[in-house]
Image (cartoon, rainbow, N blue to C red):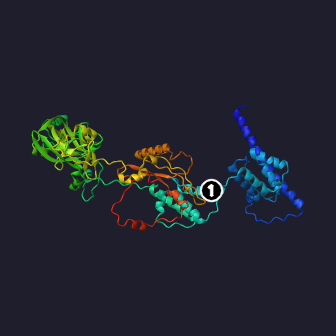
Amino acid sequence: MDPADLSNQLTRIAARQEEQDHRMDQIALALQTLLNRSSSGTASPPDPVVPRISPASPEGCRLSMKAPVRYDGTPNLCRGFLTQLEILFENNPGSCMSDKAKVGYLISHLTEKALLWATPLWENRKPIIYDYEGFTSELKRTFDPSRRATNAGRSLFHIKQGNRRVAEYAIEFKTLTSEVLWPNDVLTLAFTEGLNDAFMFELAPLKLPETLDHLIDFCIAMDDQIRERRHPRDRPRRLLPPLPLSSRTTVASGNQENVKSDLPVVEPMQIGKTGISEAERAHRREKGLCFYCAGADHFRLQCPQRPRGSRGESGRASQRPANTQVIGSLYASFVNDEKKKSRILVPISLTWDKVHIKTEAFLDSGASGNFMDKQFAAKCLIPLVLKDRPLMVEAIDGNPLSCPHITHDTVSVCMKTGVLHHENICFQIIESPSCPVVLGFPWLAEHNPVIDWVQRDIKYWSPRCQSHCLGRVNVIASLNVATAPPLSTEVPEQYLGFKEVFSKSRTEVLPPHRPYDCAINLLPGTMPPRGHVYPLSQKENDVMEEYIRENLERGFIRRSSSPAGAGFFFVSKKEGDLRPCIDYRGLNRITIRNAYPIPLITELFDRLKGANIYTKLDLRGAYN
């Protein structure tokens, strides 16, 4: 026989067996009901007359209930199993079963550990099998001894919404509230404490409902509105902007209205779709004429007759030639002179052939080279060198500039930035009257200066500049300054009587125990505070490890696995060092204070009246 057919037959046999068990359970309940009625000797009351709702559905007035799933002793399933039995007994027509019959029915649905526990009770006819309530209580005490109310109460103040929806968080919260008998005020407080900070920020200006159910409904609706606002389902599409006038074609016919066409603009001086002929192209290239209008004063990119935004310019920025220089924020900043305030201008001096000039350079990280204005170079008589191959220059968006090609460079000039930084550099010549000198990204990447963007100034130079670009400072004169002698570590003569007080070695050992050691008595019912974990910087971590190592060696502290502990923080000294401190404020709050009189501050000040000399002492471990 095929294993698959055998498996199907076994499944059908098991289903029939379960159905037969269910029928036998119902027959047993009905038989027990009849026996109870006959033994009581009382006639059953006549059934009330119930009007028929629908003759087509005679079974609609009867509730068919299935027997509960057999219980094997799992702790978290015990409560649900007993609840199903309770519902079955209450809604069964023959619900007047005796306690022994209910216990027997319950035991018939036990398996494994639970059945092993109940079998001796039934076989030995223990008195508990005649008390259904007592039997279920003992069953719960054996297999479900957990303190549900206590655990649920703890969980109510620990669950958090996190990134979940409020509806999901409310389901978990309501499930736990069914285990406790807390007042409404406490439940609403616990619910709001579990909401995330972003949602509580939205609820801050609103008046919240007072009851828990209304509060949950309000928060769920509010959360749905917030999520709908962040992720709208049907976002209306933006309409395309109207076409510019240069890309529209109008046709006038009598009194008819102008008809707009989406056809592309046909540029003049073209033959079909391939542009001008090869002979004409060669002729214009030889004469240096514009390929668009055959003009002599400009190129095709700057042709005033050529419409902007045509199809030929699409994709220029993404398909930029390799021999193209890009100007970033340089020309964008020329549009409005008010933006000069946001530029970073550094003072420079240029030197060549014993000629020395001073000016300012604009730091532009968006420029792909170092540039100089053509008119500025001519005014300062800076020699120029013709490039072997012209470079195309354009803005960062691909639009051409007034000078589309770079044809000249300056000779190598000595540029001094600030006071000590100097180098030899060549500039590419462009037309930029607003910024005579531009230092672009290559210069910034080479020198890598530290720039203060608020003060708009160079603060520090890179390590490379420290060894290559910064010149040495010539010493003009020297000045001898008298320095104070080092402070003596010896105890002054007038304090020799207190020499032991200043002994450093005495502070590295603990004093001996004496009969009058101070006790730390805690308030009744309190526990020492627990320690917390805090992130530390590398410097703080090194100081903490050194502090722990020294105090372990001295015996001031010892290793402990107790969860109680005091906090650890640092106090900055005047010298810049860190002084580790132990935070005992949490322990002090639960300590019984000694009620002894202490001097008044006014009395201490009275004692200092007339004093002229004061002594300042640096206490060792004063913060501990």
**Position of 578 relative to 256 (above/below):** above
Left or right placement of residue 270 versus residue 70 in this view: left
**Position of 325 relative to 2 (above/below):** below
Q: Residue 224, position in %: x, y?
A: 50, 58
The residue carrying mark 1 is 152
Q: State which quadrant residue 52 falls in.
A: bottom right
Q: Residue 1, position in %: x, y?
A: 73, 31
Amino acid on which the number 1 mark rests in the picture: Ala
* Residue found 20% across the figure and 55% down from its top: 337
Judging depth in this view, the residue of 468 and 58 nearest the camera is 468
**Is residue 527 in view?**
yes
Left or right placement of residue 356 versus residue 91 in this view: left
The local crowd at label 1, few if under 14, some if 14 to 19, many if 20 or more residues have their Cα within 10 Å, is some
Q: State which quadrant residue 525 falls in.
A: bottom right
Q: Residue 257, position in %: x, y?
A: 27, 58
Q: Residue 6, position in %: x, y?
A: 73, 35
**Position of 425 relative to 581 (above/below):** above
**Is residue 397 in view?**
no
Left or right placement of residue 578 versus residue 558 in this view: left
Q: State which quadrant residue 152 falls in.
A: bottom right
